[in-house]
Amino acid sequence: MVILKKTADYIALNIISYIVVSLFAIFTVAPFLILIMNSFTSEHYILNHGFSLLPKELSVDAYSMIFAYPEKMLRAYGVTIFITLVGTVISLFLSSMAAYVMFRKEIKYRNTLAFFIFFTTLFNGGLAPYYIIVSNTLHLQDNLLVLLLVPMFSAMNILILRNFIKGSIPDSLIESAKIDGAGDFRIFIQMVLPLSKAALASIGLFTALGYWNDWWTPMMFMQNDKLFPLQYVLYQILSSANMASSMVNYVSRLDMPKETLKLAMTVVSAGPIVFLYPFVQKYFVKGVTIGAVKG
Amino acid sequence: MKSRINGGFFSEIYKNKVLYLMFLPVALYFIIFAYVPMGGIILAFKEFNIRDGILFSPWNGIENFRFFFASGKAWQVTKNTLEYNVVFLACYTFFSILTAIMISEISNKWFKKIAQSFMFLPYFISWVVVAAFIYNFFNYDYGLVNTLIKNVGGQPIDIYAEPANWVILLPVLYVWKWVGFGSVLYLAAIMGIDQECYEAATIDGANMFQKITKITLPLLRPTIIVLVLMGVGRILRGEFDMFYNIIGNNGILMDATDIIDTLVFRSLMGTQDFGMASAAGFYQSVLCFVIILIVNGVVRKVDNENALF
């Protein structure tokens, strides 16, 4: 190891790096802070002065409004949490199972199967046939199932899992398990799944994020407002002027904090993901890199 | 035992029936949600009515395409989609590499970690939430930008009235949302560079800037080429989520911000114009497929290891 002399160019580059990276970090995080802060500003101040850069006239009106009539919000939370948990578990289990099959040497058609999955990322029929088939042929509209099924599998994730299993589980391990009399399914459950924990954690988080942030599926296929997930409720609040008030109360009051309510709703619906994020960040970073390296 | 020997398709399935059964759920999913709709692409050559469905609606030749191209929309949305995506890809690549190199130069671990966390944060929110940011900042009556303008005595601006604003704002938003993700990708590649290269260069008296331009960038080249080409493969797929949430159905901005995906969506869900939606969808899918094939051919030539297939 060469001892790094702190030469002028080294120091200059370091300073530039700190400045550029700091600016980028501020640029990305500032909107979050400003939005949260504005959601805690009194409606009265905003109607008179507009949203501001610095905290002014703090108030929790918008939040107390949401929590005063929480039924719709809680219901949306319930739908989102349900589809995120159930969808992610099913997706992970079936994806890794398919990945495991494509990894097993005994399967003569394993590469054909992989191409069968991969091809769907190259070509698709477009939105119109997809929409007609899901809603008119399968009759999935207004069914909770549609929220689970549409985002369920990602071809890329299945192929990444396959590469991970390929790279981390030697064939000899499978062979010895077979000699010990373990069946194919048991090998998957008792050996492959536990050994793939790292990849499952990363892929699982990406899948869960996909479910949590999915507003597209309900927009396309859901008319029943009892089954709206959080993101779609937020979408509706933002896209129509009076939706925010109708979310919390059927009788619109004059002193409704309309402007801040929109921001508070945003905080409430994006909050869990953003607060959870520091704890799971390393799995995401791992996920990005295992996806990037082709095995 | 007999089937074991002849090794045909059915004996292969029979022999490994448990394994094939384990693959079945995913296979069914992709058949139903990907391959059947793929077959549905014939819709582009039909005059669709709900009663007859995709299969039994009458054929109408290239009528849908004639309409799509005659409307003048085809050229406009293609141009918009291409222009935005080229700018997005260029900005994203440039800033991802820039921040990745800068992050790799920073020695303070805590600073590095926190800065990366901040930059990765926008990746976790949906474009719906980004739309709330836009509302917070650019709303005409109460938006932050107009508050600041009014404070210094200026005239408030209506950001939605001027298409030119979005030509700048959309790439900025795109970079804001994806640069954290991109920098992680490129940083992983930088971390993979052998430290000995840098040590040898130090001994030879190279300064830091020379190390970046003569070692880091050349060694990143394969990664850059592959990631850019993969981006090129998606160049006709718009960021529907972004355009739809940020711009929506804004009449003034339509000409400047209508991309293929928003046109397809609007025809399908708005005007129920299945002909237009399926023709534009067909046009996009087929062109995309051709571009991917070309790109993959190029990747193969440049760097066979990283070819998609």
Image (cartoon, rainbow, N blue to C red):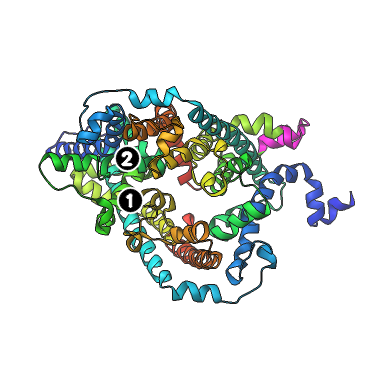
Which range is magenta? Answer: A172-186
Chain letter for mark 1? B
Quarter in which the N terminus of chain A is drawn: top left
Q: State the image coordinates of residue B27 (x, y, percent, origin top left).
A: 68, 49
Badge nearest the viewer, 2 or 1: 2
Q: On the image, which quarter does residue A237 sit in?
A: top left
- What residue lies at 40% left-to-right and 65% top-to-bottom? B77
Chain letter for mark 2? B
User: Farthest residue toward the right?
Assistant: B2
Q: Nearer the viewer, residue B204 or A173?
A: A173
User: The disc labelled 2 sits on which kind of residue?
Assistant: Phe
Q: Is residue A176 magenta?
A: yes
Q: Nearer the viewer, residue A59 or A213?
A: A59
Q: Which residue is mark 1?
A: B92
Q: Secondary structure at mark 1?
A: helix
What main secondary structure does the magenta stretch of the protein show? helix
Q: On the image, which quarter does residue B142 sit in?
A: top left
Disc number at residue B133?
2
Q: Taking the image as drawn, is residue B250 in sight?
A: yes
Q: Nearer the viewer, residue B199 or A71?
A: A71
Q: State the image coordinates of residue B262 (x, y, percent, origin top left).
A: 44, 58
Q: Image check: B16 left or right of B79?
A: right
Marks 2/1: CA–CA distance: 20 Å
User: The disc labelled 1 sits on which kind of residue?
Assistant: Tyr
Q: Secondary structure at mark 2?
A: helix
